[in-house]
Image (spheres, rainbow, N blue to C red):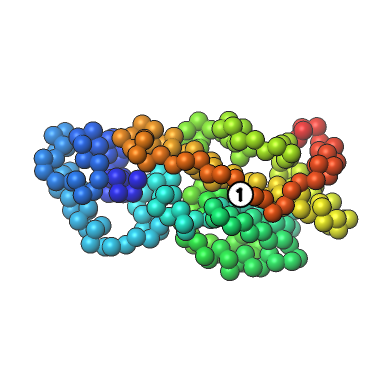
Amino acid sequence: MLFNTFLHIPGIGEKTEKTIWDSGIHYWEQWRAPFPERLPPAKIKHITFYLEYFRAQGNNSARFYANLLPTNHHWRLFPHFRDRTAFLDIETNGMAGKECVITTIALYDGKTIRTYVQGRNLEDFRRDVDDYEVIVTYNGKNFDVPVIESCLHKRLTQTHIDLRHILARLGYKGGLKGCEKMLGINRMDLTGVDGFGAVLLWREFTRTGNSNVLETLLAYNIADTVNLETLLVHAYNLNIASTPFSLSHAIALPEAPEPPFYPDKEIIKKIKNMLPWDYR
């Protein structure tokens, strides 16, 4: 979508972009006379200037385009930077402020799953995340990223696609699990486990040292992370559905990777029984 996009030009909104597309101009290279009749000469001159300017820049970084595009259109970056994108989710001890501790992190790039655990290899995340140019989260701008930056003293400078508002704009709300349910994503054995359940799993692990409890927590954290790719593909396809590119640019839903950890059904049952009724 980047090379079909005109929203990156200052002062150009979705209505003008649609006018350009409706005139048959779908790519930057097609921007030439005859121009759309509905556009005044001053706007045509304005668009021409910026398209030539951006071509001259020769900047193909995600940050370059992200700085130009409205935040709710950052989904357009995904196909172009997919091989430099990581999906990210963290779990914590449930505390706030200085008492907040990251317990686990999962990082997924569409091929490889990486996990990080407090007291084991959490610091490795600081190095590994720099392999990527784009990060994708759900509500990460409000939670995951600030917590990482505070707890790990690591500034995340990557272009950040936060799915929360992108999905909400499409009518999908109710948190990560709510959006998954609305889009038909089944969590199987992890159904019913939420963020508070992850807190309880960590408490149970620190109390017992049971490796099965930790693996169950990691399985949950990984599910949160891996499902972000599917949610982003859904969001991308839904966003282009009303454009001239609904068929040519559609992305196939990804296949779920083989998880390195599986939840223990008995432990899941125990944790669910520990949840307050409001969480069940």
Tell me the quarter of the image containing the N terminus.
top left
Q: Is residue 139 visible?
A: no
Question: In the rendered image of this protein, does residue 106 appear above or below residue 33?
Answer: below
Residue 26: x %, y % from top left: 25, 41
Please tell me in which quadrant of the rendered image residue 72 appears: top left
Question: In the rendered image of this protein, does residue 187 appear above or below residue 159?
Answer: above
Tell me the quarter of the image containing the C terminus.
top right
Q: Is residue 156 left or right of residue 59?
A: right
Q: Residue at x 55, y 49 (%)?
A: 137
Mark 1 Cα shell of 10 Å, populated few (<14), some (14-19), many (≥20): few
Residue 143: x %, y % from top left: 61, 50
Q: Is residue 256 visible?
A: yes
Please tell me in which quadrant of the rendered image residue 237 appears: top left
- Label 1 sits on a secondary structure element that is loop
Residue named by callout 1: 257
Give the farthest residue toward the right: 208
Please name whichever residue, 83 or 162, is drawn nearer the observer in this view of the structure.
83
Q: Residue at x 74, y 39 (%)?
A: 189
Q: Is residue 167 left or right of residue 124?
A: left
Please name whichever residue, 228 or 123, is drawn nearer the observer in this view of the structure.
228
Residue 156: x %, y % from top left: 53, 62
Q: Residue at x 68, y 64 (%)?
A: 122
Q: Residue at x 69, y 54 (%)?
A: 260
Q: How many marks?
A: 1
Residue 81: x %, y % from top left: 43, 55
Please name whichever residue, 219 or 89, is drawn nearer the observer in this view of the structure.
219
Residue type of the residue flagged with mark 1: Pro
